[in-house]
Image (tube, helix red, strand yellow):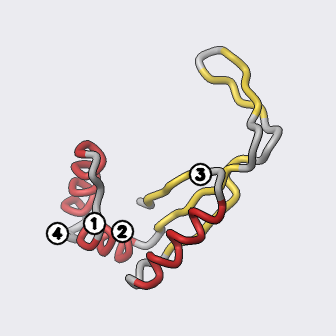
Amino acid sequence: MSLKSINCDLSVLEFCNILLEDLNIHSRIYLSRKEGTSVIIRGKRYEYTHDFYELRIYRKESVAKFALSIGFTIQRKQEKLQQFLEAHSYN
């Protein structure tokens, strides 16, 4: 399991990456979707007007540390994260 956040503002994700590094949470930033790429959503075609970047927390230990140190404010996301941790004996 990995946690990810997608944003078109690379500087926001770079800042988050630095904060995560300070907490010893391993993460990386990837180009998720390139500007000009087409996508079909609910039968309608759209084109991305910006590059989209993805910050990904990719190690189980880092996911567990994120859950303990930061967590989510959105209840359904927090519950899903807790279920993952319990299933993998991290809680």
> The residue under label 4 is which amino acid type?
Asn
Q: Could you tell which of marks 4 and 3 lies nearer the N-terminus?
A: 3
Separation of disc 4 and disc 1 at Cα?
Answer: 10 Å
Outermost residue to the top: 43
Q: Are marks 2 and 4 in contact (CB under 8 Å)?
A: no
Q: Are marks 4 and 1 in contact (CB under 8 Å)?
A: no
Q: Could you tell which of marks 4 and 1 lies nearer the N-terminus?
A: 1
Classify residue 57 as left or right of residue 62: right
Q: Are marks 1 and 3 in contact (CB under 8 Å)?
A: no
Residue 67 vs residue 18, the one in the foreground = 18
Q: Is residue 74 above or below residue 1?
A: above
Q: Secondary structure at mark 3?
A: strand
* Number of numbered labels in the structure image: 4
Q: Which numbered mark, 4 or 3, is in the foreground of this view? A: 3
The residue pinned by badge 4 equals 91
Q: Is residue 91 above or below residue 47?
A: below
Residue 66 on image: x %, y %: 33, 70
